[in-house]
Each structure stands twice: as C-alpha cells, then as structure tokens.
Amino acid sequence: MLNNKWFACATLALAAVATGCSSTGDKNANGTAEAVKPTTTSQGSAAAAPSGKTSVTTPAATQSIVYFDFDSSDLKPESKDVVAAWAKYLTANPTAKAQLQGNTDERGTREYNLALGERRSAAVSSALQSAGVAASQLELTSNGEEKPVALGHDEASWSQNRRVEIVGQ
Amino acid sequence: MTKFSSILLVLLLIAGSARAELEISVSGGTIRAQPIAVVPFRQGPSEPADVAAIVAADLSRSGQFLSLARSDMKGFDPLPTSEAQVDYRTWRALGQEALVIGNVQALPGGGAKTVAELYDVFRTQKILTVEATATRPTEWRSMAHKVADQIYEKLTGTRGVFDTRIAYITSTQASGRRQFKLIWADADGENPREIARSFEPLLSPSWSPDGKRIAYVTFEGGRSKIIIQTPATGDYVTFLGEKGINSAPAWTPDGTRLVVTLSFQKNSDLYVIDLATRSRRRLTDSFAIDTAPTVSPDGRTVAFLSDRSGSAQVYTMSIDGGEARRLTFEGRRNEQPRFSPDGKTLALVNYDTSGYRIGLVDVATGVMRLVSSGPLDEGPSFAPNSAVVIYTRQGTAGAELATVSTDGSVRQRLRHTGDVREPAWAPYAKP
Amino acid sequence: MAGGFAPKKGKRRLTAEMNVVPYIDVMLVLLVIFMVTAPLLTQGIDVELPQASAQTLSADDEPLTLFVDARGDYFLDAGGDPKKALADQIVIDRVGAILRNKPETMVLIRADKAVKYDRVANGMSLLQAAGAAKIGFVTDAPSAPRSSTANKRERG
C-alpha cells in the first residue's frame, strides 16, 4: 500500500511535468495533476488522481471503489475518503467526467440487482453532488450482479462484489 | 435408476447427429414411473430420426414414464407394427402397462408421416391413434415430439411439452474473456441454436405470446438495451435504449405491448410500451425499486417486484394503472414473479432463512408453496402447460437449470459445460 | 369426587346410603390390572399371519414357464408363438428381459418325463444365466386324485 502510494506520487509528478511541458491540449490530465498535487498527503486522493488522469482503460484503483452492505445502498463511513477524493478531483476539473458503475453480489434476482446496482451508484452520485460535483459530470450505470470481481459463493466474495466503481473519463 | 441411465445412453447413441447442449437427467421425485414399451416403428434404415427412440426418450425424461430398453426387446422379434401383431401376454410378462407401436412413412421431399398406436396392456385394447407429420428432414424430431405429446396427454391428462422450445443464457470462458450466449433449444436440449452472442452480459429473455419473437436485455456497448429478435430469421431491433436501466421486458398476452423497467427518471419504474407506436405510459411512480413485471394471461393484471415496504415483495396492479396491492407476506423477500400460462399460479423467488427458493403462489388464495431447495435458486419460468417450472440453481460446477413439476413430484437437472441460467420456456407454437 | 361422601364437620349423622368409595377403588384397581395385562395377553397368543406381498395385482401373478418337450426343444409361454421352438440365446434374452422389468416373476420349468436330464439341466442354466434366482419344477403328482394340480418344488 505504501509502495503504491509512493509510486502513485512519482507517476503523478512525472505526469505533471510531462503534460505541463508538452501541450495545452490535454487540459484534463493537466488539471488533475495540479488539483491533486497539494493534497497528496491526504488519504486516497493520491490514487484518485492517476485513475482520473489515465482515463478509461486504466483499471480502477482500490481507492475508487465504494463498498456496501447486503441489499443496502447506504454509504458506509469508510467510503468517505473515496468520495472526498473524487469530489475534490471533479470539482477542480469541471470538464472531467466520471462513470459510477453499480454492482451487487449474486444473491437475489438479476432484475432486482440491476436496479439495486443503480441505486448504489445513485447513492454515490448524491454524495458527490452534495460535495459540490455537478450532476452533468456524473454518469450512472448498473451492471447488477453480472460483473463480479470475486467468483466465490461466500460472504468474502460477496462483500467484494457489492460495490460502486468510480471510473474517470 | 441405472436402468434408466442406460436407456438414456442408448438413446443418445441413436440420436447421434443432433448434438444436445444440455444434459438432462431426472433427479428424483415422489411418483412411480409408469412402464411403457415404445417398440421401434416401422421405418427405413437411414432416415433422419429414429422416431420411436425419440418418443421413448421424451416419455422417460418426463419422469412419469419408464421406457422399456431396446435391449430388453431383443428376444421378442418380430416386434409388432400393427394391431394384429400385438400379443398382450408378452408385454404383461415384461411388466409394461402401455405399449406404443407405429409406422413412419417417408414422403418425397424429406417429409414424413407417422401413425402411432397406444395400447393399454391390462385392458388389452387400443386407446389412442396418433398422427404427426413433418415436411422437411429437420422436422422429424419435432414430429416425434408431437407423437410423444399426444401419448403423454392421453396417459396423464396433461398436455405434453416435448414439442416446445426453451431459451437460456450460457456464460463460458472464451479466449480469456467471459462470453454470453442466448440460445434456444428443443425442450430435450437438442438442436441448440444461437440467438445472440456478446462479451457483455445478456439477460431477461422473454418470449412473445406467439413464440415467434424474443425480447431480451443486452449490455453490448456497456449500457443496458432491450432487443426484440425473431430467432427463426435472426432479424432484430433495438427496442429501447434509454439512459439508465432498460430491463425486464414482459409481453402482454396479445403481443402488442411490453411492460418494461426503465430508470431514466432517476429510479426504476414500470412502463407500458406499445410495440407499434412506441408510445409509453408510466405504470408505477414510487421512490422504491419497481421491476420484474409479469402480465396475467387475461392481460388485465401486472405482478411485479417492489421494495416500497422496505424489502422486496410482490405486488399486483391493473395494467391500466391505479393502486398496487401487496400479494406476498411470507418470507423476508419475494422477487421475480411469473404468471403461469393458465393464470392460476404465480411462480416467484422467495428468500428466507434457507436462502433463495422457488415458490408457487396460488393466485386465488395467496397461499405459497416452496418447490425447490435453494440456496440460490432464481429465474422461474413456466412450461406452456403450467405443470412444470424451469429455474436456475447453483450446481457444483456453476449455475445450471432445473425443472420441477408444480406438484413437486418430478425433478430434472439440465447441465451445460458452462454456466447456464435465465431460462425462458417458449409458449406452444400457434398453428 | 369423594367430597360428597365426606362427613360434615361438626354434625355427624348416620346416612342410609351405601358407601361406594371402596367399590370404586376396587374397580379402578381391576381396571388397571386389565389394562396392563390386556396387551400381554394378545401378545402371548401365537397367530400365524398370512403372508401378503406388496404387489398383489392379479396380472402380476402369471408365472413364466419354460417348456421342454420330449425332443428336448424349449418353448416359453410369453412372447411370440408359444408353439415355436426357441434357440438358447432367445430363451436367455426373453427371460432376462422379463426378470429385469418384473423381478418378482416366478419362473417354472415344465419338462416332459421322456426328455433327457441333460436338456433340463441346460434349460435351468439358461434360466440362471438370464438372472432367475429361483426356479420351480412342475410335476404331476403320481396317482393323485387331482392330477391336474401342479406340485411345485423350489430350488434355491
């Protein structure tokens, strides 16, 4: 974890330098770096930055995932940092966009879970909006139970699958 | 049981060319299977299908009959192919209660006509003459299923479902990625054909009442869309692709409208969409999740899932709108209702201490019976005769399909090499 | 119960009624004795109950008979023409199929007295190869008044 953070900081700095030198076209990446740079000491934002910067193809860092309890769309206290980091990034970059992908575990029917996944992404969305993010910056999607990250049939796997992934665009 | 599996094996060998995708086995039940002898029909040696073998396999697979193995008929040559040749003493000695003989007449152009006769061995009389025809070689299996359907109906009083089709979704690993396929196959798992294939999830297949079209949900492109496709031709249209969720299509019995779940207004609600005009009418407007609609066969009532009470429960309301009435109170949750084709029963997924199980609710009395053992059963779909429910269960090697007769007496398991789920039993083909 | 018969406090008067309490006591004791002994009594009686098998459909009772005629040919009374001599393999196939599908079928051998012992023994081994665990021999009782009745002996 610590190593990751240092690595993130390093890439961040590098990226900032690189984009700063090259062109002004890539406003998004540039802005990200600037916005986050002063706050690298705080938790989570370090990881949020690269995932915001490196667009769609980059897999979401662990700090971009919000986990939920079974059949619940209430944000847990430990998700605060993730929301705060993304709120900071998105408010600093009004042109940046993020996709909120809601997911559920395999329990329950697929159609209900599709709706539950969306309700989870809506919960994250309203948390971000109350932190100042514009609704237009957020796109809500739901995968229901169709895209699990852990394939087991036990609570250990289920708890990892009940999540909203925030993907910068 | 071993005898039964050997019958299956023999029949599978005979079936030969047509490869079944689903492996079907009768996995238990409470009734005694009725012994029936389906002797080889008189037909040419290298014809598209061994009609009697398919009939025998159908009857055995129902769990209500035990077909006499071909190997046990060996010593009784010549086997009867006409009424005059039937020796009841023989079949009684073999412990058989019914006997089927028949003739298959190949017609020019690859078609055929089967005339089969059903005998009651104890009452020593003919009780049914069955006729079925095929116009193409590919219809021979269907012709055999039609013969089996009529025999089944005569002996059990319930219309058979051998000549029907089932759609289901498979999920397999293909070149390191998960691939989803929507397949339709004959009810015996033979003759599988692909309707759609995607690296994104497919779900909620739903047959139109005439069985000619199928609506389903695809995530192709990363977002949910509702597709309506004609499997016979492959033609399809993207019917709905609104912002947010587009899911859970359910046809009205007249086939002119779809009830669907849309969330473009921030929250999952039900809408009635006219197929011809695409005009939409909002059916529910609540802060809760409303989804998984099913329309009663009389076209008047919609049953659906809603968590407006705090947990998911099944509600009913008029398709014209109005107040929703809560139908289920048993168990912690009740999801995914499906009306039976006769409108008397509602299948659903019940969640309680023993997990998710399939429940059958008597629409008139509201009494629920649980017919599966759980713990992760879902996706119930009625056979067109309302006597069997097919659903998804968690097997040892992934999701598999299972069926249970509505009285709980016969159970089957349908296995696939990958995950198989979301079954949708097609209605009877309209003539 | 007995409260009605209890002497009233204070006044003691002679009553002309009979005191039935001891009788009731005795009756109850007798009742208990009979209740206890009744089941023991029925258990003690040795009754030979008729043996009834679970499946007693009349049609199921038909035995399967292998006939061996004077020339040593085999015939079965099930499946096809009963007057047609059968090859050994056909006998095994037929009897085997019948026993597999109706295991409770009784298998009998009815052999002509003139037939060679060898052919009967062979017939028996065919039946055994077909899975018959019990084979009955049908004979006519010598000088019996009811000569038509078959006398069966079972062989394990």
Image: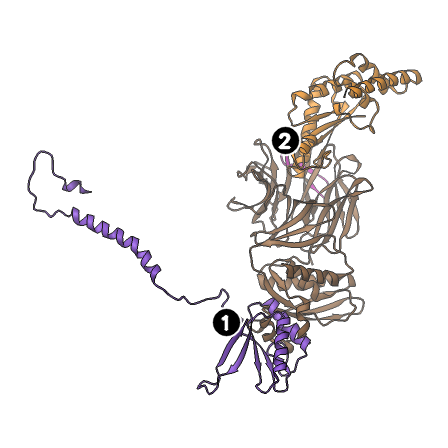
Chain colours: A orange, B brown, C purple
Residue B272 coordinates in the image, percent (x, y): 67, 39
Residue with the most extreme top position: A38
Comparing marks 2 and 1, which lies closer to the viewer? 1
Q: Could you tell me which secondary element the residue under label 2 belongs to?
A: loop
Q: Find disc 1 in the rendering and name its residue.
A: C58
Q: Find disc 2 in the rendering and name its residue.
A: A70
Q: Which residues are magenta?
A: B273-290
Image side of residue B385 versus residue B230, left or right = left
10 Å neighbourhood of mark 2: few (<14), some, or many (≥20)?
few
Q: Could you tell me which secondary element the residue under label 1 belongs to?
A: helix
Residue with the most extreme right position: A22
Check whether the beta carbons of the residues at disc 2 and disc 1 lie within 8 A of each other: no
Who is closer to the viewer here, B35 or B10?
Answer: B10
Q: Chain of mark 2?
A: A
On whether residue B281 falls in the magenta region, the answer is yes
Residue B119 coordinates in the image, percent (x, y): 60, 71
Question: Amino acid type of disc 2?
Answer: Phe
Residue C65 coordinates in the image, percent (x, y): 57, 77
Q: Chain of mark 1?
A: C
